Image (cartoon, rainbow, N blue to C red):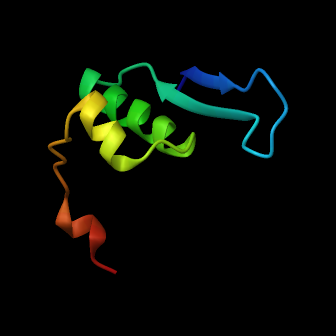
Amino acid sequence: MRYDKLTYERGAPSSEAQKIEFDIPQDMTVHEFKRICKRMASALGYSSTSIDEAFGQSKEVTNKTLLKG
């Protein structure tokens, strides 16, 4: 499967992550893309409150059978 990339590179040195990169499947839906963008914002240190204000709260559909161990 081929992937596109969503990459953030910090422009100045810091003690934070310098590069965050996600491999994005080409058949990703817009809802899945939104979830990836929210994950990147979280990885960059934005608070969950700020992320929810900017992107709206997600209506996650969870497959509970995947959570069973």
Q: Which residue is drawn at 44% across and 41% down?
A: 39
Above/below status of 49 relative to 27 = below
Q: Quadrant of the C terminus?
A: bottom left
Q: How many marks?
A: 0
In the rendering, at what x and y percent does residue 29 appear?
A: 28, 24
Q: Residue furthest right?
A: 13
Residue 36 image-quadrant placement: top left
Q: Residue at x 27, y 77 (%)?
A: 68
Q: Which residue lies furthest to the bottom in this view?
A: 69
Is residue 47 toward the left or the right of residue 10 in the image?
left
In the rendering, at what x and y percent does residue 61 appear?
A: 16, 49
Q: Which residue is drawn at 62% across and 23% down?
A: 7
Residue 8 image-quadrant placement: top right
In the rendering, at what x and y percent does residue 37 appear?
A: 42, 30
Query: Foreground: 5 or 59?
Result: 59
Is residue 50 toward the left or the right of residue 1 in the image?
left
Q: Which residue is drawn at 25% across and 28% down?
A: 31
Above/below status of 40 relative to 15 = above
In the rendering, at what x and y percent does residue 59 appear?
A: 14, 43
